Amino acid sequence: MTNNVTRRDWLIGGSALAGTMLVSKMAAAQTVPAANLNPTPENPIRAGFNENVYGHSLKAKKVMVKAAETAHLYDFFSQRVLNKVISEMENLPGDHIAIENGSTPFLEKAAYACAIKQGKVLTTNPTYSSVPGTAKQLGLEVIAVPVGEDMGVDLDTMRAAMTDDVKLVYLCNPNNPIPSIIEKNALRDFCIEMSKRALVLIDEAYYEYVDNPDFASMKDLVTDNPNIIICRTASKIHGFAGVRIGFAFAHPDTLRLITGPFNLSLNNVAVAGAIESYQDMEYQNFIKQKNRESMDILENMFEELGLRYIKSNSNFAFFHAGRPSTEVAEALKKRGILSGRPFPPFTDWVRMSTVKPEEMQYVVDVYKQLFA
Amino acid sequence: MTTNLTRRQWLAGTTTVAASSLLLSGVKASAQTFMAPNVNPTAENPIRAHLNENSYGQSLKARKAIADAADDAHKYAFEDIFKLIGLMAKLQDIPKEYVGIGAGSTEFLEKAAVFNALDGGDLLLPTPTYGDIGRFSRSLGSNLIEVPVGEDMAINLDAMRRAMTKNVKLIYLCNPNNPIPTIIEKNALKEFCNEFSPQATILIDEAYFEYVDNPNYESMIDLVKENKNIIVTRTASKIHAFAGTRIGVCYANPDIIKRMFSLFANTLNLSAMRGAYASYQDFEYQNFLKQKNKECQKIIYKMLDDMGLEYKESNANFLFFNAGRPSKEVAETMKKHHILTGREFKPFTNWVRLSLSKPEEMQLFADIYKREFG
Ligand SMILES: Cc1ncc(COP(=O)(O)O)c(C=O)c1O
Ligand SMILES: Cc1ncc(COP(=O)(O)O)c(C=O)c1O
């Protein structure tokens, strides 16, 4: 496990190899956790939740250990530092940026804001279910326009489905569970147009993974269009799923609807870690690279087995297994591999998150044994 | 700092006075270490007596659980929340369906404000009180009915009763209150809750619950068990020292819990949950902090008595006293000595809210205060 660490592997952290790497001296500031090549139901390969299985940047880890010493204090200062880092990085005014415990709080509060206006939600299906799920729980009507033939978000049909009752339009770009993107110019027009009639929330959770000339973040729109909200998260490429940092970009008046007056709600360790992680480009590039390697392994299998799949712009794949995804999930689970839950109506399709390339190869081998 | 550890200080220790020196010294130092008092405050490292934090830091057991969780932090913490809910249910002897966990209690206050706005209701609350729910309600467009505290500076239930209208769908009561650390007499409160919970949700914010040592006080959690329309919120930010870690607990009937917590309970920090799981079971530490808090209260009471200044007996980890001069002036002066005190609370602009940190630090405060204003 320790013998074939490449230069790039140094970049990331984990306890498993830490000691050895320090001794080896060459080890930049980073070490890497070993791949899990003997998965069991108790210690599975987690290809089910679109997490970053490499864990945090070591730079982030280091400051997080230190920040634990302030765990008993309300720390407003660090939040402002993080705000400034993001503000400079995204070229947005600081008052257009809000920080929360992941992006979920913003998604839920956008649904609340819609409910307060007694509006309906317009979205696509399938998509990430936090907004439509929360809206339904609040008793709101959700207009969910099916994705098109190409399984991409169908903006024209959504436009046709728009009514004056709709007070929130939610789109996930790249989408989830289908890792497609929406073409940038079409999306920009759509956002501007819809924002005249409703709040428009573009969830860019997987933004950092996209490598596609047809994609663009819609963040530039927030300065001139008060009804547009962009959400981002540290849960994906930064590995913060269990740490919790997320962002909303919007006009200050709109942010007020989806953030409380006292921003007490942040974990100091999370804030300190995010400040480092967002500036650690080397680490982010490394994760992107690893993601690409794993995605190639998966897509090669799809090609080889002749399975239909959607080109991924993200850290997960969506492919047509030709059998119920629940059946695939059960069989894989027995072999210590977690895969995505069913996403109706695409019940024969499987969402598989990338894991480390070594683990991805293992997943592919098992999949072929089981189903090829 | 490591040289003169008194009996009390065994339990303490910044990271420098940590385990090793204590263990080597042969003293049987329970399992705990914590931050040493800051008796030489500086501008960079002031005494923080302004935000009602717990200056001792977290229980060692919590700190260990948090550190051990670091390697799992890239995962969504789906299972830990159920474990923590189970513990909170057990500790309060209430079914799990009545428990919600959040990133601090602020989350519940804000959600309650949202649901009230959704129902188109007004918010009835005392003033002064903790301001989060009022401010958020206002930004959501809700109408506020604010009822001043009584002559005795305690929350005035009778006046609130008179101010009640049928548009009120949410009543906020902070018990103990903040910035005035008074409590509401238990029977009167129970009666009030029974009277109004049929027509409005009553949120009882028990952030300072653990510090109360007063026979006239009672948590309203029993009314929650009776399925009343009541939300009791608690926080790990105070006695558990989780202000920058973020765990809050809310107790309410299952219908309310279901409304407050959507399907996606993945907004919580995994190490915070594991830390809370350890901290809430560390009674030794909680008792120690309660005792320290009392010592702090005594020191400041003595100062106030010596100086003949009016104050409210505290049921929490802070005091509220009449400085006889603007609290802003006090804050400015004390800041020069690197001691931070509470902000201004209108209309009590001559009253100072002082958070109780450590006895040694409070003694320093008292000495300087007497020198400056005595
Ligand atoms: C599209 C999308 N948005 C938001 C989230 C939730 O993210 P966070 O962890 O920031 O709350 C996810 C998580 O899977 C997601 O896929
Ligand atoms: C009465 C009261 N409620 C709630 C809070 C906020 O607590 P939390 O840190 O749990 O969000 C405070 C913090 O000072 C408070 O005084």
Image (tube, coloured by chain):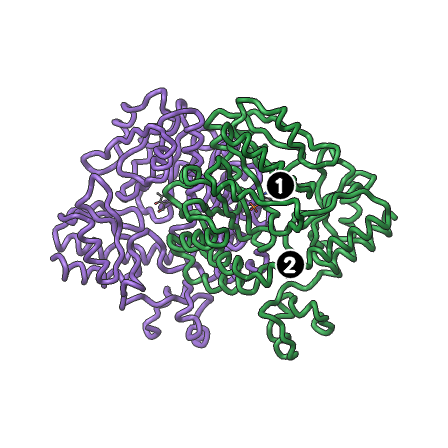
Observer able to see residue A238: no
Question: Can residue A208 be seen by looking at this rendering?
Answer: yes
Q: Quadrant of the C terminus of chain A?
A: bottom left
Colour displayed for chain B in the image of the structure: green
Q: Residue at x 70, y 52 (%)?
A: B356
Residue A150 screen position, x and y as percent: 20, 37
Residue at left 29%, top 62%?
Answer: A44
Which chain is mark 2 on? B
Q: Quadrant of residue A180?
A: top left
Q: Amino acid at mark 2?
A: Leu
Residue at disc 2, CB closer than 8 Å to ligand 2: no
Distance Cα–Cα, label 1 vs label 2: 24 Å
Image x and y of residue A40, in percent = 27, 65
Task: Spot the purple chain and give its letter.
Answer: A
The disc label shown at residue B186, or none: 1
Mark closer to the chain start, 1 or 2: 1
Ligand 1: give its quadrant: top left
Q: Quick check: A268 above or below A255?
A: below
Disc 1 secondary structure class: helix
Residue B55, image quadrant: bottom right
